[in-house]
Image (cartoon, rainbow, N blue to C red):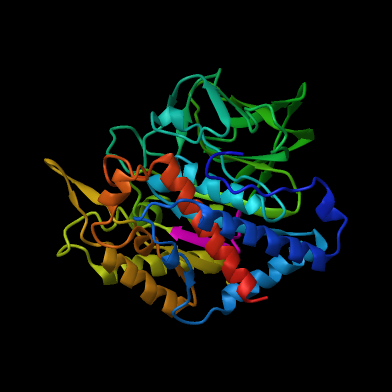
Amino acid sequence: MEKGKPEITVIPGLTSLIPGLTRNLLLCLAVLCLASALRGQDLPACVHPEASALVFPGDRSAQDSLYARLDSLLATGQGNLNVWHIGGSHVQAGFFPNRIRDDIDSLTLRGDRGFLFPMALAKTNYDKTYRITTTGEWEAPILTKASKLRRPRYGITGYGARTASPDASVAFRLNPDGGDRWACSRLRVLGYGSSERAYPYVLCLADTLRFAFDSLTCSYVFDLPAPTDSVLVRFAVPAGEEFTLTGLLPESFRPGVNYFASGVNGAALPSWLDKCEDLERDLQLVRPDLAVFGVGINDSATTAKDFKPEKFKDNYRRLIAMVRRVNPGCAFVFITNNDSYRYVRRGMTWNANGAAVRKAMLELAEEYGAAVWDLYGVMGGAHSVEAWRKAGLAKADRLHFTDAGYTLLADLFVEALKADYLSQR
């Protein structure tokens, strides 16, 4: 068993054979197992698990409607629930959302793993749970950094890479460990050519595939000859043309919970709202049933005097309106900021805005009938990050978490989500 990971035994194929009532009973037992395993851990004194619960300052009907859909999924083994987790560096590297995805997978039916992108092209850190390689010359300016390079139209991944190379390609493998956890029967290539003469094509299982163009999402769709975890995408780029890649979306059509993560180092709400002009269009690919909002640490990275809660809330209102235009019934969970330090010219200083962000998120949750998961409270509030660093849960920058810290937080978050679900059954 992976260190720190509650052991939940799942019998392959069992969920397709048992009635819905039994499935719900197994879910209850699995959640209780997760909760008891966490309680049984020798948690450092800096961790406050009593603060780890979903809080609803106002109406909770959207969350309860989400649970009703989960009931149907568990009872019938049919359909999908789509979760969209958006944030900054906590999300980009993948460890935090991947652990949440793993915990959810261990409790219900597994869907798809969401978007891929070759982040190494942007010379930044990346999710190591899948393997992705490229050939050819590419330019990939980062959304949140000043660049002399011409910027692409960013979308839901927050990344874009441009090529004019006739030998350009991107290849991925979903199971680099050799397992069979992930597979896809369809691939969507997100991006655009400088003209119709520049386009992607796919080499898969000895077949060369041409795309069908989805005009709603402006994505290139490839139906694969058989389920696979490995695909090679090449690009037809004639002289004088170029193609810009903004993401890859493997799809399997299997029932379960699909978990999509969008994270860019340094991203604040204006990064997503004002610089990702294709974000709302790309949300059609997700149509989230639950949006997990983890944006805020970079919005608050300023003095207490300069942080404007009303502006922060107005930006979230814009994001919520965008999501609701795609799915009016979407439920929302806000994750409050961790206690942290922020960068200043001569080093780092304590970020005094953690409590203000929590207050703003509680007010938004009351306004929109959303939930809040209080990461700030789980840490112990103001000046708690130093104790987390000493316990090996936060990194030396006192801004990011260690792998052990992200593991613990993800486990606590999923326990809170599932405990709330059970409390309503």
Quadrant for the N terminus, please.
top right
What range of the chain is rendered magenta? Answer: 284-293
Q: Is residue 97 left or right of residue 26?
A: left
Quadrant for the C terminus, please.
bottom right
Q: Quadrant of residue 395?
A: top left
Q: Is residue 327 left or right of residue 86?
A: right
| Residue 238, percent from left and from top | 55, 22
Does the segment drawn in magenta span residue 174? no
Q: Considering depth in this image, is 248 or 403 the residue closer to the camera?
A: 403
Q: Considering depth in this image, is 366 or 103 the residue closer to the camera?
A: 103
Q: Residue at x 39, y 32 (%)?
A: 124
Q: Considering depth in this image, is 265 or 21 the residue closer to the camera?
A: 21
| Residue 117, percent from left and from top | 52, 36
Q: Residue farthest to the right?
A: 17
| Residue 372, percent from left and from top | 44, 69
Does the segment drawn in magenta span residue 285? yes
Q: Residue at x 56, y 64 (%)?
A: 417
Q: Is residue 342 above or below residue 364?
A: above
Dominant secondary structure, magenta: loop
Q: Is residue 285 above or below residue 196?
A: below
